[in-house]
Image (cartoon, helix red, strand yellow):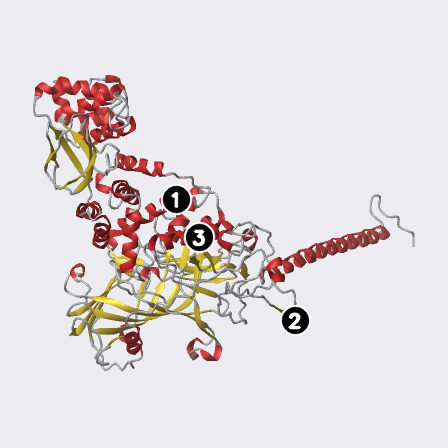
Amino acid sequence: MSDEKPKKGAPSGSLLVTLAVILIVLIGLAALVFFLLTGAALGFRGDEVATNETLTGETTPPLIGSINSRPVISKPASSSEELEEYTTKRMSTTPSTSTTTTGEKEEFEIKSVDLDPEAEVDEKNATDSSVTPVTVPPKITYTAQNQAAIDQCNALESANTCPPILFNPDTRPIDQIQTSFKPLHYNLSLLVRNVIAGELSGALRLQLEALEPTKDILLHVGAGYRSHNEMLTTAISCTSGKSVCLKNLYHDARKGLIVISLTEEIPAGESLRLEINDFYVQNARAFFTQRQGYAKDPEMMGTKMDVKNQMTFFPSIPGYKAPFSLCISHSPSLNVKSNSLIDKQSTGEEMDPRVRHFAKTCFRQTLGISAHQIAFVVSTNAQSKIFNTTTIDGAYIPDIEILFSQNERLIGRIDTNWIVQETAKTIATLTQWTGVEYPLEKLSIASAPIMPNSVASAGGLGMMIVPAAVIEHEKNQRYHSHFLRNIISQWIGGIVGLKDQNEICLQESLVEYLESKLHEDHKITLVVNRTRAESLSDIEKAKVLEYMRPARIQRGDHCGARGKTLFYSLDETFGPSTVISMIKEIFSKYSFSVAGIQEYADALEARTRSKTAGQLLRRWFNSTTPPTVLLKVDSNKISVQQNGDAWSLPIEIAGSNGIQLIDITGNDTIPFQSTDYVIADPKRRSVAFVGYDLESYLRLVRCWDDSRCPSSKDDLKGLFKDFGYLLLTKQIEVSNAADAPRWRQFFHFLHSRALVQGHAKCCVAYALNDKHTVESVDCYHFVGDVCSKIDLLSKMRS
């Protein structure tokens, strides 16, 4: 056979083998480098995990009030671990290095510091620790006044001997059915079926007390409440222990109401236990959920109910506070947190056979809270930090726990020291202002994938649920404001609740007022630099809002800001501690209960000894228009005129004898003598719009450049702004057409110095035939629609 020569350009067999060997070696080297790098990363991660299971090694300066700056960081328990019962300890900053190893599990020993100030302190520990031991007040225990009756009613055996319930809609208009029961105790059991879908089922045992003889029970539920088992809905009298039969049960899903009609009338003062079993909830607006996603955030589900949206995911009665007993059955891989500490956990054989593959977490009975304030968060792989109990200026600061909705990588970038500092300082200040210290052992702050609201706080007493962005962005002023308002809501809304949801503007106003005072008096954070002068200037700013939106005061976004100006006005009129003393009076009477406008007005009257102050507060939060006062000044008297319903309000009047505080109760004639200028509200402390007659306005013009004027130019500017509002609302009347030239003189003064703004400026320009301003884009249509129809302006132009 003849030898065949290889084709030109084709590789030989030995060359192919060589290339294959080189390729295998390169792949092996790459794999080796990859595993080495991965091992290093895992080793670092393991060190980090070990650190997280004990005290952190951060070298941050100690927080104010000797708060431990090194928090205990808890890793989520695995499905096979039982969660530790929470205990409050004062931790040493030098944990013991000795560990006991059993298999692969390490047990870390943490030493606690004696809390007794007279006890001897180990010198070695004192040298090593940068934290000074503090005296923590003993835990305060609050018990419901009728706790014995609640326990007795809960112990009654349910033996339903009633006929089947009718499911026909009630023939009466459901809006006309009023609830005549108040809740005494909620016993709520939930089963989390699907975290991501926000799906759960549950059972409710609700104890009620009849306020008057009635046969009807009216319950509120929110969107997402799908159904309940009518056959398992029963009632029993707590007095006789006998079953009370249900005549009819109707759920109006559109209005979020459940009406239950009883076959017999319940006398006033008698208690009833209502059981609603096997209800089902999915995609309720009261929940938030979070998927793991690409960033591997922890899966979460929790409540986001607030005072603005009191529609709960379970049947309830709003407007009352009552203690809650909450139990949640869930997958063993989930952690659960709520308003109170964990009381008991059950798994496996301890569970009902039907749900034996679930775990059950029961929490201690809460204090009296509103139904929308019961909160919980279930999560997988969510981390938390706990800062231990301490005191600041003698005020008790509870354990502060931060539950993160962020992934582990992002948590490492978050500085939580500012959260603890601001929380502690705010708690200490509110303790002083209200006279009531924080009543719980722990405050949980859970971050959640929700949007920041203007004022409303999600969660309730013992648990704040805040947007994740608030935790992440410490230098954002808006988020700081939202965070502080959530803490304030632990008192305003948490300890003292809102009596009527229609009075929500009162609560929002109090929260905004207290937040402003925190910044003014205590400089809670460097991010917000607010002074009292800026807060007082808000009185003028709030009046500007009335120009074009007088009908939206109660429900608009500026509701809280408008109400805050009333509280600043009261402080300026009756003394700088007037509102704080009113709040302290409320907390002394209504802690763990509810209070409304009437109760706050009564407290204000008691503190100021002025019925007019209380009447002003009542009217302010029940009115959609601001007060206006028109004054005519004569030689020895002042005539007061109020258009429409008269207000009762205090107002300062300056004259040659100084400033006097005078109560105005309607269309009055006030004896008043002065040899100098007479100016009402000279320091701009009133929330009323103040107007004058023509002669008085011309005196204000002369007062502008007079050193004897009792008002500064800034205060006079405010009076001229009031004139702009009164002009637009047609409250400036002209009885004599011959006065038109003198009115033009006054208008020239306002126009030349730009003392009126907005639409009032358009009308002033229209009266003076300033075509350039009148024909501008901002004024053209308004002049035709409004200014041309004002009687005073028509007479000035004729």
Q: Which residue is mark 1?
A: 521
Q: Nearer the viewer, mark 1 or mark 2?
A: 1
The answer to which of 255 and 769 lies nearer the viewer is 769
Question: Helix, strand or loop at disc 1?
Answer: helix
The answer to which of 56 and 284 lies nearer the viewer is 56
Give residue 378's quadrant in the image.
bottom left
Question: Helix, strand or loop at disc 2?
Answer: strand
Q: Which residue is mark 3?
A: 423
Q: CA distance from mark 3 to mark 2?
A: 38 Å
Mark 3 / mark 2, whichever is N-terminal? 2
Q: x and y percent of residue 374 in the render?
A: 36, 62
Mark 3 / mark 1, whichever is N-terminal? 3
Q: How many marks?
A: 3
Q: Which residue is mark 2?
A: 101
Give residue 258's quadrant in the image.
bottom left
Q: Residues within 10 Å of mark 3 (few under 14, many from 20)?
A: many
Q: x and y percent of residue 340 in the render?
A: 41, 65
The answer to which of 48 and 247 lies nearer the viewer is 48
